[in-house]
Amino acid sequence: MEPNVFLENFKKQFIDGDKLEIAMKTEFRQIESYDSLTGMTIIVMIKDEYNVDITDNEYKSQKSINDLFNLIQSKLKT
Amino acid sequence: MIIQNNFNYKNFCELTSEEQLLVLQWRNHKTIRKWMINKEFITINKHKTFLMQLHNNNEKKYWLVMKGTDPVGVSSLTDIKNRSAEWGYYLAPEYHETSLAIEFYYFTLDYLFNFIKLEMICGFELVNNQNASSLNSLFGFTKEKTTKAVNGIQIDLIYRKLSKRKWIEKIKKDKKILKLLNFALSRSL
């Protein structure tokens, strides 16, 4: 699982994903176009692309894209 | 109480004292009140008066929405006339940013069109309410800028509208909506 690929997959969930300038350290709820529906499509993408289930509470406690990436990695290892 | 795919709609006129208090707490919660057109803090006395006035009122209906036995939000209709009405809704604060939103939205719209038999649903959202805007757009509501006088002040709003025909012929079977709905349902089993 590559961070740059994850970042691209993450950006695709945004309505303005092709114009977004974000990095792994970006706190994703601070992105202007982020909303709860985008949040849900991100969780679906994680299931589709990485076959990892993230609960609503786990998702809510993540701040940066890197936090989310690390959570997925930890779940892939178990 | 009406049951729609494990979602129950309990008329505000039938609420227990505990449920009356619960919806007041939700209504006054900062994360809900900030997206209300009327942001006024509601006192318990005002709330009780409001609930009393709902009895025998054919132009306004409010429901406590429950999933199974869990109260999850509120759905309302105002200005009910000729099979059209203005829709309002909110999720309980603990369900914000969860996949329940898509279930709530889908089954509540289906309830309003198929059980209440509305032909047209309209509504207003604050221009900066991005969460509501995304959901309303996903579910095919038309979008139009407008203003409305609230307590003597004109505020900018987005006016939304969705017909029963569009709901049945297009939105209810939209692939993206069904994918999100099925995903949400699979998590809530």
Image (tube, rainbow, N blue to C red):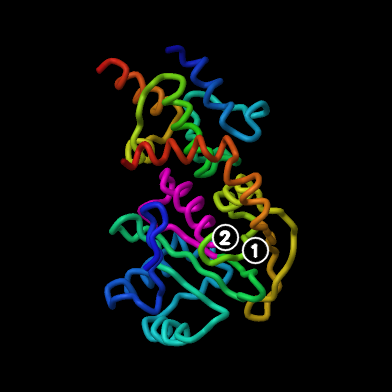
Give residue A75's quadrant in the image. Answer: top left
Residue A12 part of the magenta-drawn span: no
Name the residue at 64% across, 70% down: B83
**In front: B154, or B160?**
B160
Residue B91 part of the magenta-drawn span: yes
Label 2 crowding class (10 Å Cα cut-off): few <14, some 14-19, many 20+?
A: many
- What range is drawn magenta here? B88-112
**Residue type beneath disc 1:** Glu
Expressed as whole percent of the image width and height from the top left, the position of residue A63 reads 41, 35
Chain for numbered disc 2: B
Label disc, if present, on residue B119 of the rendered structure: 1
Secondary element under disc 2, as helix, strand or loop, is helix
Which of the image's four quarters has the C terminus of chain A?
A: top left
State left or right for residue B138 relative to residue B57: right
Name the residue at 67% across, 28% down: A19
Query: Where does label 2 land, which residue?
Result: B113
Expressed as whole percent of the image width and height from the top left, the position of residue A53 reads 35, 28
**Residue type beneath disc 2:** Phe
